[in-house]
Image (cartoon, rainbow, N blue to C red):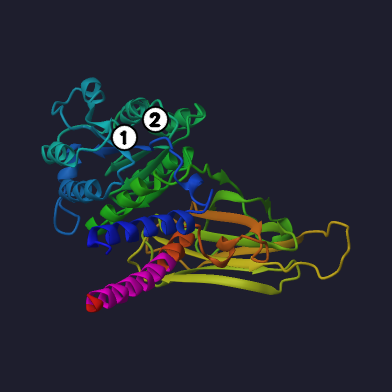
Amino acid sequence: MITRQRLAAGVCALLAALTAGIAFPAGAVADETAEQAAPKVELVLDVSGSMRARDIDGGSRMAAAKQAFNEVLDATPEEVQLGIRTLGANYRGNDRKTGCKDTEQLYPVGPLDRTEAKTAVATLAPTGWTPIGPALLKAADDLNGGEGSRRIVLISDGEDTCQPLDPCEVARDIAAKGIGLTIDTLGLVPDAKTRDQLSCIADATGGTYTSVQHKEELTDRVGQLVERAADPVVTPVAVDGAAACAKAPTLKSGLFTDREEFGQQRWYRVEVLAGQELRTSVSVAADRAVNPDYGVLLRAVTVHGREIVRGEATGNGRTDVVSTGLRYPKPERDDDDSDKPAPEVVCLQVTNSFSATAGVKTTPGMPLELTVDVVDGPDQAGDVASFGLGRGWWLLGALVLTGFVAGLLWGWISRWRVAVWRTN
């Protein structure tokens, strides 16, 4: 008679075999588990005296920053090495030379001890100058080394006070080194000079600028940027869209950045062969105060103006980025012509319905990020992802199938055990 222990061991062995043979077919997920270099992020926080101002949801700018840091630290992915640097946190005097050296690393870049990092942030109090340029130079040094992605997230409420070391020039110098470091900036005050400087810093390295006026916005945006560091490294390419498809630049697969003015149209061209699928998405960031109720439209049209497919999204003033996307599968040719067919030129049109609030400058245009991917179409063997299913769905489907088979097997074994028990 089979004992319960032996029966359980047999079931476990069978389930293990099913999982190994079904859920993990050879090579299906090997490339997803390959070890990658750890991404690095340093949060650079302005702790100058102006951060005492109480104009963010009834509290001080410093309080909003601390709350954002605490929530972001809790949500930081395990694989991200995170550090914190301050500027203007220590020197209270009036000596400019000394004040412009006031930047220190509050928490070193590395594996995150959330309790220790939170404790360090809790001790901060608004104090001194605003040496953004020197802080960026030091932050770049903090992130030096390694092959993973590197990102600086700068949160400030004012212009640099340590000229002539222009922080925008510092950012350009960092970009010129070719070390793949991105600087994203967040402004806590909707001031034109602050916005222009922080936008310039971000643009120099392919980063983003966001104007933040509420605590939840600050938390959400910093969290997004930290999580983005864990994504595969893709260097965006600056491109100038045209006012019409005929003059638009032709894009290959990749990530592109542009600027789009309020209510403006930007056109781009993509070549698609028979049997291929075009997948594209666009995000437009409201980096300044805008009126509520807005939208972004992405259209794929032929060179003759006939619409093929469209994607659209709307917002109501509660988000600073609006994104949408579309897909266009071009069918295979039915004939047997051996000559390689000419690609179809697809025109991509990006339109927005943002409008600026009173007194807000409309130039430069808002940051636009366009993703283009031309892949084998859904008719190609094995291209499960072309139906919107990533490789992770193989695992999910396999686990469901394994559970189903295991359930049947367990039910059969249970009935057999009951039958044996009755006969004894």
Q: Quadrant of residue 422?
A: bottom left
Q: Position of residue 322 (x, y in %)?
A: 44, 63
| Amino acid at pointer 1 | Asp
What residue do we see at 70% from left, 67% from top?
Answer: 330
Give the residue number, with chain letter if any, for mark 1.
Answer: 160
Position of 49 with respect to 190 (left or right) is left
Q: Quadrant of residue 122?
A: top left
* Residue stretch in magenta: 401-421
Q: Is residue 402 magenta?
A: yes
Assign a secondary structure to mark 2: loop
Q: Residue at x 71, y 59 (%)?
A: 272
Between 48 and 115, the residue placed more toward the observer is 115
> What is the residue that sits farthest to the front in this orientation?
424
How far from the left and from the top, in percent, is residue 38?
Answer: 38, 36
Q: Is residue 265 visible?
A: no
Which secondary structure class fits the magenta region best? helix
Give the vertical position of 318 relative to 225 (above or below).
below
- The answer to whether residue 62 is seen in the rendering is yes
175 part of magenta stretch: no
Q: Nearer the viewer, residue 210 or 191?
A: 210
Q: Are marks 1 and 2 in contact (CB under 8 Å)?
A: yes
Q: Quadrant of the C terminus?
A: bottom left
Residue furthest to the top:
97
Q: Is residue 341 left or right of residue 126?
A: right
Give the mark nearer the N terminus: 1 vs 2: 1
Q: CA distance from mark 1 to mark 2?
A: 8 Å
Q: Is 242 rendered above or below residue 228? A: below
Which residue bears the numbered disc 2? 166
User: In percent of the image, x 50 and y 59: which residue is there?
Assistant: 390
